[in-house]
Structure formats: structure tokens, C-alpha cells
Amino acid sequence: MRFMAIIKATPDTEAGVLPTETQLNEMGKFNAELVKAGVLLAGEGLHSSSKGARVKFEGEKRTVVDGPFAETKELIAGFWLLDVKSIDEAIEWVKRVPNFDDGESEIEIRRVFEAEDFGPAFTPEARAAEAALREQIGG
């Protein structure tokens, strides 16, 4: 099972405060543990929302809204994509993440859809097309 651990933004991440050398080293050690355990598929930090944009959809209309975005608690600052046996295992890994915030911070864990989750609506033809796309991107 794949799970995404979503690191919620904080006022510091939205202000563009970068991690210290010590913090980067601690996070590097944690990431190395994930790699050694064979569970890390991907993981990245994100720039603040001031460097982003949102595209809103209404029928055929598309509207672009440039950042920053007001509600920090609704934003993400980074993620890990983990391949583990269960949500419980994902939770155990996330509980080990170094916490650099003296205040409150949060990491949300969400399961990634797999082909079998879509049932018969995901036809053999659609599965083959999806497999071909994944082959092209190397996944």
C-alpha cells in the first residue's frame, strides 16, 4: 500500500524560513532510515504558497489565482510517499519524523489509490493504457 504523508504548512514555512544545517542533517538521517527500510518512494519540500498559483475550474472557464494563500492550515509544505503494509505502519514512521516546531505542527496521512480500488470501472483497456503511461515515466 502506498501512503502520502503530507506535511502541513506553518507560519514559518509560508514566510520562507529555511531549515538550519542541524535540521537538514536530522531530516537527512530520517530519510536515510526510510530508504534503508525500503519504504520511501519519494519525498520533497515545497516552496511557500507565495511562489505558487491555483487554477480554479468552473465548467469550461479557468481562473488563475496567484499566491500567497491566506489559510496556512490548508496548505502543504512537503510530503513523503511511502510504500508500507498498512496505515498503522505509515503512522509509526510519521511518528518518528523530527519535529522542529516548538509550537503545533501536523502531518496528514492519506492512502494513494491503487488500480484494484477502482473495481470493474477500471477496464483491462484502461489498465493497459495506465501501465503504458507508467512505463513511459519510469514508474
Image (tube, helix red, strand yellow):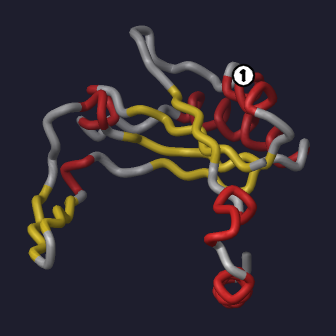
Q: Compared with residue 56, is residue 83 higher up or lower down, i.e. above or below? A: above
Please tell me how many numbered marks the rendered image carries. Answer: 1
**Viewer-side residue, 63 vs 20:** 63
State the residue at coordinates (45%, 17%): 101
Q: Compared with residue 106, is residue 121 higher up or lower down, i.e. above or below? A: below
State the residue at coordinates (82%, 47%): 39
Is residue 55 left or right of 84 when viewed as pictured? Answer: left
- Residue lying at the far right in this picture: please name it: 37
Is residue 124 left or right of 73 when viewed as pictured? Answer: right
Q: Quadrant of the C terminus?
A: bottom right
Is residue 92 left or right of 66 when viewed as pictured? Answer: right
Amino acid type, residue under disc 1 in the picture: Arg
Circle 1 is placed at which residue position? 96
Q: Position of residue 113 (x, y in %)?
A: 63, 55
Q: Compared with residue 122, is residue 133 higher up or lower down, i.e. above or below? A: below
State the residue at coordinates (9%, 68%): 63
Could you say which quadrant of the image residue 103 lies in? top left
- Residue lying at the far top in this picture: please name it: 103
